[in-house]
Amino acid sequence: MKVAVTGASGFIGRHVVAELESRALDTTVVLRPSSAVSGSFSRHSTVWMDVLDPPANAFELMGEPDVLIHLAWGGLPNYKSSHHLERELPAQHRFLKGLIESGLRNVVVAGTCFEYGMTSGQLREDMEARPTNPYGIAKDTLRRRLECLKNDISFAMTWSRLFYIYGEGQAESSLLPQLRRAVERGDAVFDMSGGEQLRDYMPVGEAARNLVSLAVGNRDNGIVNVCSGKPISVRNLVEGWVKDNGWAIKLNLGQYPYPDYEPMEFWGDRQKLDRCLKSQ
C-alpha cells in the first residue's frame, strides 16, 4: 500500500510517518517548501508542495498513493483567526477535490473536536456539529463539502476528529512544553487556570497509531473521534505530569481565565474508534 502524508513535518505528522515506517509501508511525505526537514524523512519519497497552491499534477507528483493522511493546516493555534475561513478552507477544498478527481480513492482527514462547538459532556459522532470559532467552522465546512463530492465521485473518507493530543514535538505554546520550560528555569510555581475543566487527552504516539490504522483499513468510516474516551481535569493532568517526572514545581491555580471558545466539560465517545480498529 502506498501512503502519502501532508503536514508530515508537523507535530502529529512526524509521529504518523514514524508509525508508517514501523509498519514498513511505502510512504511519501508532502512538505511545504519552507519546512525544516528531519533526517528521518530521507528514507521516504519526499514531495515539496504548498497545498494552498498545488500544481495541477499534484496527485501524480505524490506517486498516486492508495491513501492520503491529510494533516496539513495553517494558522494554528490561533483558532479565532479569519484565516481559517478565508484562506485555508477554500484552498484545502481545492487541493483535496483535485486529488480525488485525479484518482485518489481513500483519504483520512484530520478534523477537530472544536466542530462540536460549545456542547458539553460526552461527544458522539452522530451529534450535530455546532462549531463556534473560525477554525472549527472551517473544518466542519470542509467535511461537508467533501461529503457532497461523494455524490459525484466514489471514494472512501475517514474524518478523524482529534481531541487533545500531547507529546514530543508539540507547539511551545502548549501546556506541557510551557510546564517543562518553567521547570527548566527553576520556577517555584507554574501559573495556569483553575484547572477544573474536563478534557480528553491522548499521547501523540497513540493518536498516530490510530490514524495509520484507520488509513490502512481502506474503509469509508465517516466521522470518527480520535480520543481516549476518558475525561480528566486539566489540574489532575498537570499534577500527574509533575508527579511522574519528579518535579518540585507548585501549581498557581486560577492565574488565567478559562478559554471562552470551549465548554468547561467535554470528552469523546470512542466506541466507534474501537469498532474501526477492531475490524482492521
Image: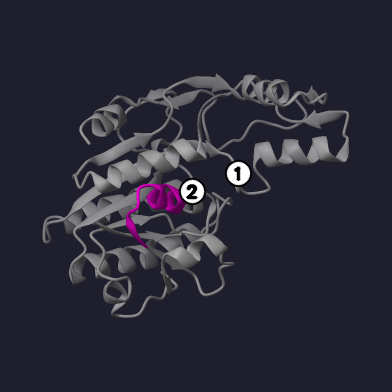
Measure the alpha-carbon separation of dots 2 and 1.
Answer: 9 Å
Query: Do the residues bearing badges 2 and 1 touch, measured as CB atoms within 8 Å?
Result: yes
Q: Position of residue 272 (x, y in %)?
A: 27, 29
Q: Position of residue 194 (x, y in %)?
A: 70, 23
Of callouts 2 and 1, which one flags the residue occurring earlier in the amino acid sequence?
2
Res. 240 image quadrant: top right
Q: Which residue is located at x 43 percent, y 49 percent?
A: 16
Q: Which residue is located at x 25 percent, y 69 percent?
A: 64
Mark 2 element type? helix
Q: Can the viewer see residue 115?
A: no
By secondary structure, the bulk of the magenta-drawn segment is best described as helix
Can you identify the residue that label 1 sits on? 168
User: Quarter of the image containing the N terminus?
Assistant: bottom left
Can you identify the residue that label 2 sits on? 15
The residue lying toward the viewer, choosing from 144 and 239, is: 239
User: Quarter of the image containing the C terminus?
Assistant: top left
Q: Can the viewer see residue 250?
A: yes
* Span of residues in magenta: 15-27
Q: Amino acid at mark 1?
A: Glu
Q: Is 18 inside the magenta-drawn segment?
A: yes
